[in-house]
Image (cartoon, rainbow, N blue to C red):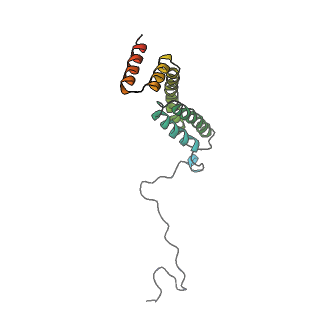
């Protein structure tokens, strides 16, 4: 028997570790995707599109988010088509969700602008600004309801 510790040779050098094997069921990434990094434009486009969809009822906010979502998603889609990055599905998702959020946000923005330019609405805000009591405010609201019902 020798006095050499396990894993060392007779000259005191440590033996190299055994080669590590991947866990069972593991498959290497696809060759085209391993060489490219992530598609940040596609990810940003999808995230912005989701926020645009959730916030489309906020005039101007939803509209801006939807436009940005479409811009980033289209840039991500172009990057994926050129083979510079993966994430084509993310980019397509961003285009679809952003494309749905854009007309909804536009509808809410146009509705707000139309409401603010409405004569009855301006009369209501003027009346409420001049109201001194709660009864005056109720009277303003009743006049507004009658004016809108015409």
Q: Is residue 46 above or below residue 127?
A: below
- Residue at the extreme front of the image, as rendered: 132
Q: Is residue 87 visible?
A: no
Q: Is residue 42 visible?
A: yes
Q: Looking at the rendering, in which quadrant would you find the C terminus?
A: top left
134 and 104: which is toward the camera = 134
Q: Identify the residue at image location x=39%, y=14%.
A: 146
Where residue 133 appears, as percent x and y from the top left, is 38, 27
Where residue 64 appears, as percent x and y from the top left, is 56, 33
5 and 145: which is toward the camera = 145
83 and 67: which is toward the camera = 67
Where residue 97 appears, as percent x and y from the top left, is 49, 32
Q: Is residue 86 above or below residue 123?
A: below
Q: Looking at the rendering, in which quadrant would you find the N terminus?
A: bottom left
Quadrant for residue 72, please give it: top right
Q: Identify the residue at image location x=48%, y=86%.
A: 4
Q: Identify the residue at image location x=40%, y=12%.
A: 149
19 and 72: which is toward the camera = 72
Where residue 122 appears, as percent x and y from the top left, is 50, 20
Q: Is residue 101 left or right of residue 145?
A: right
Q: Identify the residue at image location x=54%, y=31%.
A: 60
- Residue at the extreme top of the image, as rendered: 150
């Amino acid at each position: 028997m020798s006095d050499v510790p396990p894993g060392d040779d007779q000259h005191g050098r440590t033996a190299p570790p055994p080669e590590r094997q991947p866990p069972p069921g593991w498959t290497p990434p696809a060759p085209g995707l391993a060489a490219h990094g992530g598609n940040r434009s596609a990810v940003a486009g999808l995230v912005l599109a989701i926020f645009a969809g959730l916030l489309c009822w906020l005039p101007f906010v939803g509209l801006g988010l939807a436009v940005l979502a479409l811009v980033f998603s289209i840039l991500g889609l172009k990057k994926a088509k050129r083979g510079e990055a993966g994430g084509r599905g993310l980019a397509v998702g961003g285009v679809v969700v952003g494309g749905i959020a854009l007309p909804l946000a536009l509808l809410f923005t146009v509705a707000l602008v139309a409401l603010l330019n409405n004569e009855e609405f301006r009369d209501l805000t003027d009346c409420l600004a001049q109201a001194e009591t709660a009864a005056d405010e109720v009277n303003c609201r009743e006049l507004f309801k009658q004016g809108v019902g015409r």
